[in-house]
Image (cartoon, rainbow, N blue to C red):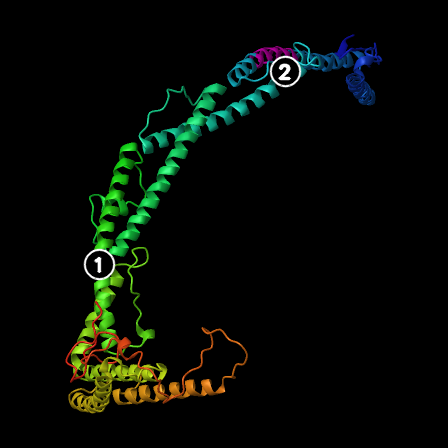
């Protein structure tokens, strides 16, 4: 009665209404034919079940034929619809393949990629060709998107750099939709790299200048002022790095350095003068070395205005201290100068074997001066005690010299000298005697104490006058009173 076509299989309906079974005729499409065979078998099975049901109700042949014809009409319509859908699918696929080929060619040209080569396994109009072109377009589109992102990033960086550096750039074509050529992209990348390097160098230079100016201002205590310095230092993030701006910053830095050098010269001069005046006060106030914390020289690399200010304060403090204690310190200094003169006389007379030769006839004056010094030493000690009594009556804070009272200090100096003399004498006695030939310039024996040479050879060699003390350093002031210590400026 009717036929059902599925694939290459044709099913005929028998006179009793059941379809005939036909084997597959296309061995090259075994999987498709196998599915078709299963579908035909399902139709046959369905029709047999329908006939069994109809047999149960003794349905007549005319009614059965009408029902079979209706069933096959539905099947025929379904198959026609399938053919139409697949035909439309093939048409659309081939049309899409043409569009994909055109798009792929355009992307290849824009990206300067390898030419389009269709694999032999993808014949014209095939699904394989469509899928190949679809994958190729997807790959090229992703590459284009990546290129556009990189291109956009470089363009934004270039715009940022041109604003910071105030420079002109080559007219490079750019768009958010079309990729630059490889040559244009490389030019853009090189220009961005070059400008970025320039910006980094200028930023580092400005930061270095800022730090140097801050250091100089810190040293001088903010006394150095130049136009634009405050604004330059307060600008936490500089934005303008143009040639003109860098030229202005460099000139400003040089002006600050020039003024700093002027300050350093003046500060060095003031520091040196103040230091030597302070040192004189240290000496007059008997300040021990470990408490003298200021170096004698000013260094513009290490010292600052704060150090100069501290030196001034130190000088003012000790000047005030000395003014309050000048009477006591003056008497102690007089004693110290006399004591130094006496020690020098003693050491000289003990070490120089020709000391008592009366060459020049001034030995009596030397001895007379020494006797006078000894008397003045006793008087100086009494003067110190009297000055201390007067000071203690008017002041509550005691005067200490190396942790000792002035009287204790004088006693310590006397005891220390006697101990040093005794130590030297014991060292000489304990030294082994040398035998054998010796150089006339090495190991010469020390003349015995009290031994007088036969010849008068050296009394005139001392260069002493009637009014000169034993000390070889110049002493100011009258000889009948305590000498005044020489001031070091």
Q: Name the quadrant of the C terminus.
A: bottom left
Magenta: main secondary structure equals helix
Of circles 1 and 2, the one toward us is 1
Whether residue 318 is visible to the viewer of this picture, yes or no, is yes
Indicate the position of residue 192 as horizontal and vertical percent values.
Answer: 42, 29
Measured as percent of width and height from the top left, residue 3 is found at: 77, 9
In percent of width and height, residue 100 lies at: 57, 15
Q: Which residues are magenta?
A: 86-101
For residue 195, what is the image quadrant?
top left
Mark 1 and mark 2 lie on one chain; the one further toward the N terminus is 2
Q: For residue 206, which quarter of the picture? A: top left
Task: Give the SS element for disc 1.
Answer: helix
Q: Which residue is mark 1?
A: 269
At horizontal 18% and vertical 74% (from top left) the residue drawn is 319
Judge whether 56 appears above or below 286 on screen.
above
Closest to the observer: 295 or 410? 410
Q: Is residue 53 left or right of residue 111?
A: right
Disc 2 target residue: 130
The answer to which of 249 and 145 lies nearer the viewer is: 249
């Amino acid at each position: 009665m009717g036929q059902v076509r599925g694939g290459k299989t044709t099913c005929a309906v028998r006179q009793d209404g059941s379809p005939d079974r036909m084997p597959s005729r296309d061995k090259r499409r075994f999987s498709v034919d196998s599915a078709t065979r299963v579908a035909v078998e399902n139709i046959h099975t369905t029709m047999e079940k329908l006939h069994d049901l109809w047999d149960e109700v003794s349905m007549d042949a005319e009614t059965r034929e009408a029902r079979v014809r209706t069933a096959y009409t539905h099947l025929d319509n379904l198959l026609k619809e399938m053919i139409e859908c697949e035909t439309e699918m093939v048409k659309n696929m081939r049309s899409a393949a043409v569009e994909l080929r055109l798009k792929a060619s355009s992307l290849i040209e824009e990206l300067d990629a390898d030419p389009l080569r269709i694999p032999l396994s993808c014949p014209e109009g095939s699904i394989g060709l469509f899928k190949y072109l679809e994958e190729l377009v997807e790959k090229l589109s992703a590459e284009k998107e990546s290129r556009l992102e990189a291109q956009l990033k470089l363009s934004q960086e270039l715009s940022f750099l041109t604003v910071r550096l105030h420079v002109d750039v080559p007219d490079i074509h750019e768009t958010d939709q079309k990729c630059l050529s490889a040559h244009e992209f490389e030019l853009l990348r090189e220009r961005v790299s070059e400008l970025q390097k320039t910006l980094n160098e200028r930023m580092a230079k400005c930061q270095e200048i800022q730090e140097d100016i801050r250091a100089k201002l810190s040293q001088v205590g903010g006394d150095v002022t130049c136009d634009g310095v405050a604004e330059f230092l307060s600008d936490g993030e500089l934005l303008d790095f143009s040639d003109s701006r860098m030229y202005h910053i460099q000139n400003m830095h040089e002006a600050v350095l020039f003024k700093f050098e002027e300050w350093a010269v003046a500060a060095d001069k003031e520091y040196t003068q103040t230091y030597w005046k302070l040192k004189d006060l240290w000496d007059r106030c008997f300040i021990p070395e470990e408490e003298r914390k200021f170096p004698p020289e000013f260094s513009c690399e290490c010292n600052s205005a704060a150090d100069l200010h501290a030196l001034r304060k130190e000088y003012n403090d000790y000047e005030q201290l000395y003014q309050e204690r000048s009477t006591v310190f003056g008497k102690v200094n007089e004693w110290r100068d006399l004591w130094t003169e006496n020690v020098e006389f003693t050491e000289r007379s003990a070490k120089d074997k020709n000391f008592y030769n009366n060459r020049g006839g001034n030995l009596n004056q030397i001895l007379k001066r020494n006797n006078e010094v000894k008397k003045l030493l006793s008087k100086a000690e009494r003067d110190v005690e009297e000055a201390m009594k007067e000071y203690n009556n008017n002041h509550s804070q005691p005067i200490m010299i190396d942790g000792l009272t002035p009287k204790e200090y004088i006693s310590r100096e006397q005891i220390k000298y006697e101990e040093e003399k005794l130590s030297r004498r014991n060292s000489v006695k304990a030294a082994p005697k040398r035998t054998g030939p010796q150089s006339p310039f090495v190991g010469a024996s020390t003349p015995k104490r009290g031994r007088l040479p036969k010849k008068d050879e050296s009394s005139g060699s001392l260069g002493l006058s009637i009014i000169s003390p034993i000390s070889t350093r110049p002493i100011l002031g009258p000889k009948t009173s305590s000498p005044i210590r020489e001031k070091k400026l």
